[in-house]
Structure formats: structure tokens, C-alpha cells
Amino acid sequence: MSAVSLAEERRVEPTLMWRDGAIVTLDQTALPHQEVTLRITTVDDLIDAITRLAIRGAPALGIAGAFGVALSAYQHCHDGRLLTERVQHDATRLAHARPTAVNLAWGVQRALSRLPEGADAVLSEAIAMAEEDERINRTAARHAADLIRQLCPHPRLRILTHCHTGRLATGGWGTALGAIRHLAADGQIEMVLATETRPLLQGARLTVWELREAGIPHRLLVDSAAATALATGMVDCVVVGADRIAANGDVANKIGTYSLALAAARHQVPFLVVAPESTFDAQTPNGAAITIEERPATEVTTLAGLDVTCTDTSAFNPAFDITPTELITAVVTEERIRYGGRHRGDAPAPTVAERLARLSTVVPDFPRPGIRFRDLAGVYTCADTLRDAAYALTEAFRGEFSHVVAVEARGFILGTAVALAANRPLVLVRKAGKLPGPLRSVTYQLEYGQDTLQMQDHTVPPEGRALIVDDVLATGGTLSAVAELVTQNGASVAGFGVLWELPDLNGAQRLHPHRVVALGRERS
Ligand code: MRU
């Protein structure tokens, strides 16, 4: 095996190529600092490259296995006679080089099936597999991108991914990272969070390298920060690849995937797996039956060649874990979407109204007897829902407003989110005595009492069109007072946007003829 830097090879794209009797590929252990090209000419060197993870990623392993059978077939072809037993022996060694990814044994087997036709037939099968894999990945990734858009209907998405599932882990393009590429091409990626993926840092070294190469915004986080990212609303969707999918839908993937799925379920963030159909293993009934590769302790006890613990410390170093199907929203392949337990039947994703209802509570006799108070505080604890609500209001009034006018106190929260989503200036309407002048003032009747609201002069210019937002529409007293402040300024009212409406109190009628959009409403 020889190693040479060949920038040209990288431009040629396919991850694994056959050149003059050798397998040519980038050494994934040298990245991101060096682009070292490997020329592999023997099965032993290929097994070495696979076991030390110079070639890795389930679909790439399948292609490598197939090329390995071709190498062996040419090596054991003498005077037109093929020593099939020798090739079969090599094939078995190759298939067992790493036990968890089903693709490796699958690729070996598929190439081996052409052995009776001779070495050229084996090679052409391997080349076909490499080309086919890129097409398959693009299709599976496209389906996954569509499903993500359906499950997370925001224009710009924050995606968390684990390990490395990009072009180098496959025949080209990538699976989970391929879905991210599609979304990025459509301008829909706000941020990718890439876990570093201990112990061998495939995320830090390879995912970051590919994201940077593709110009996709990203941040790196340690694996143990992922749950916090999910808990604090930094993630719209988790997308990962797979090494083997059991008949019941349990998924084997890089160690740490299971913890991500647990945290995603806890925080109601969709969890998607993207893989080619060939990753399904119908012979394996469930995750418990999947062999998990255990790797050397030194991968844990050292970091970049340096000891990080006491000498001779023993380690538990499984390379993969099992995510049960109950924790998965869906597995997406080039052919289908197989829903997991996180997806209730084929029901559509919950609407913003459903999420608002779920996150809020009704408090009877608050703040006075006889009043049923809709407490939306829970909505503000879920950044995802607040963001979607802001986008929904922005969409409902798209092109119709120049300013967002928000009313104290909870209206400020929604107002800020809408102003950010719409990229429009935010104007604050406050209770009496809080704003320096010159001011406009309006005194009005509340559902329970009287109040005065104030707005600074000219904060909405005369040609301005105000979208007035608040959390709840009850009698409409507060919102019509805000509308009066806006019109006193000489500006016009584009409409009213609220999270929640209490229709029994006829607030919308009071605000007529202006349009009112309420994302959720109390049932009478
Ligand atoms: O040990 P690795 O780096 O080969 O593990 C790889 C993974 O777990 C990937 O997520 C999986 O193979 C999918 S690659 C498209």
C-alpha cells in the first residue's frame, strides 16, 4: 500500500475507485489535516485499512468489500484458471473485518455471486455498486430532506448529526449528511450541530471537514453536550446513518446514537435514520441479535497518541450501540419511509395549535374568581414551538407589515420572536410611566379592570403598517388600544397576531375590520 497526496483524485469524486489493479481512496484517518490517497493492492492491506478505519462508513465498507473480492479474484487467477476456494477464503476474511455493518458482508457476497463469470465480472459488479450507491444515497437523502421539511415546517433548520455519514462514508453524496446537503442546497440550513463522536472523532475530523468543504454552517459539540442542545431547543431534528437495521426496525449505529435518541424523545425532537435498503438485515430479528464490535482500549485511553488516563486502565469500547425502533421517528431509504415508534401511525406532525394547547394550561379563578386564565408560560420554555409560532404569524401576514408592535408584558416575548423571524423592527407598547416621551397614551377597559398604554411618537412612521402581537386575545380591549396608538401616530394596522384566542369574549369582532390570526383557540 502506498500513500500519496493526490488533490486530483478528490476532484474525481467517487469515494472508492479502481485504478490499474488497485483500490484508490482517501485515508480517512489522515483527515482533516492531510489528504492522503491510499492505493490498495492486496486483500491484507484492505483488511488493515478497514480495521484501522482508513476506510469506514457502512455503505463505503460494502463497496470496499466488493472491490476486495475483485482484488482477490485477479490475484488468484493463474493462466486463465481461477482459484475460487482462495477467493472464497479471502471473501470470508473481508466480510469479518468488521462485524457490525451489514453492508460489508453484503458487498462481499454480491461481488462473490459473479465469481463463476470470472474476475472481470466481479470487478464490474463492484464498479456498478460504487456508482449505484451514490444514486441510492441521493434518493434516500432527498426523501429524508422532504420528511424533515414535513416534520419541521420552518424555513431554516437546525439539524444535529452524529458520527460521519457523508460522501466519504458512502459511494458519494452521503446518507444523513446527504439529507443535510439537499436542505442546504435549498437554503434551508441555519446550523448543523456535529457531535465530535468519541473515541475516534469521526464527527470532529470528517463531518466538519465535509461541512466546511460544502460551505454549510456548522458547530462542533462534545457528545455529552447533545442532550443539553436538545433540551434547550437548539435542534429541530436529529439525523443519523445506520450500520445494520434489524427486521423489527432496531438500528445499530455509532456508539452514542442511543443516548441521542433517548434525549430526542424526551424533548420531542424528531429522530431520523437515513440508510440504503441494503442496510436492512431481514435475517436479524432485533437489535439484541446484532453483534457489536468492541475495539481496543487504547482508543479510549489515548487521545491523538497521548495517554489520557493511568497506564493499563482497562476500557469498555463498543464501536456501536442499538437504538430501539420505539425511539425512532422514521428510517428513510431510497425506496420507503419506515416509521418507528416515535411516529404515531401515519398521523401528520402536530400543528402549532396542538403544540400550543399541549404546552399551556388553564388556571381557573385567576387572577379573579370566575376568570379562566390560559397560561402560555410553557410555550416559552419550548424554543421550537415559540419559533414555529413566530414563523406561522410571519407567514400569515407575509408582505403586509413593516413593523411589529408588541404589548407588555408577554407580548414582548412573541413580538421579539416575530420581529426576528420577519426581520422587521420591533416597537414596544408599555404600561403608563415606563417610557420617556414624547408619548401617545390610550386608557381602556380590561377584561378585569382599566389600564393605560403608551407608545413613543413616530416609532411606527406614518407610512408604516403595524402587525400588532400579543400572547392572548380575550375581549380585544388591549389590542384595540394598541391599534389606536398606532393610528394616532398616523400609521396603519396590518392586522393582529396572537398565540391564543378566547372566542367566547368576542375580541375578534371588536378588532373588526382588521384581520386577526390566532394560532390556537379555546373551545367553547
Ligand atoms: O466506526 P465507523 O466510523 O465505521 O461508524 C460509522 C457509523 O456508525 C456511521 O454512522 C454509519 O456507518 C453510517 S455511514 C453512512
Image (cartoon, rainbow, N blue to C red):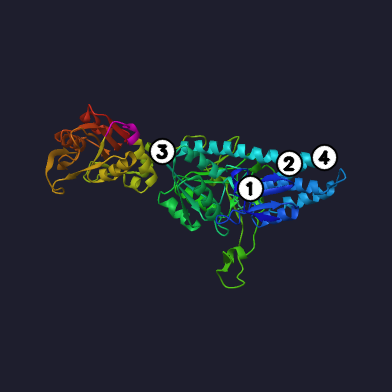
Labels 2 & 3 near each other (Cβ < 8 A): no
Real-space Cα distance between discs 3 and 4? 53 Å
Classify residue 455 by image quadrant. top left
Residue at left offset 29%, top offset 39%: 424
Residue 173 lies, in percent from the top left, at 57, 42
Residue at left offset 64%, top offset 40%: 133
Real-space Cα distance between discs 4 and 1? 26 Å
| Residue of label 3 | 155
| Residue of label 1 | 58
In the image as oriented, which residue stretches furthest toward the bottom?
311
Circle 3: element type: loop
| Residue of label 2 | 110
Circle 4: residue type: Pro
Residue 483 lies, in percent from the top left, at 19, 34
| Residue of label 4 | 116
Classify residue 140 by image quadrant. top right
Task: Locate residue 483 relative to residue 136 in the image: left or right.
Answer: left
Other-residue count near label 4 (Cα within 10 Å), few / some / many at <14 / 14–19 / ≥20: few
Task: Locate residue 464 relative to residue 150 in the image: left or right.
Answer: left
Task: Locate residue 87 relative to residue 317 in the image: left or right.
Answer: right
- Quick check: can you spot residue 186? yes
Q: Nearer the viewer, residue 206 or 89?
A: 206
Which numbered tag is attached to residue 232? none
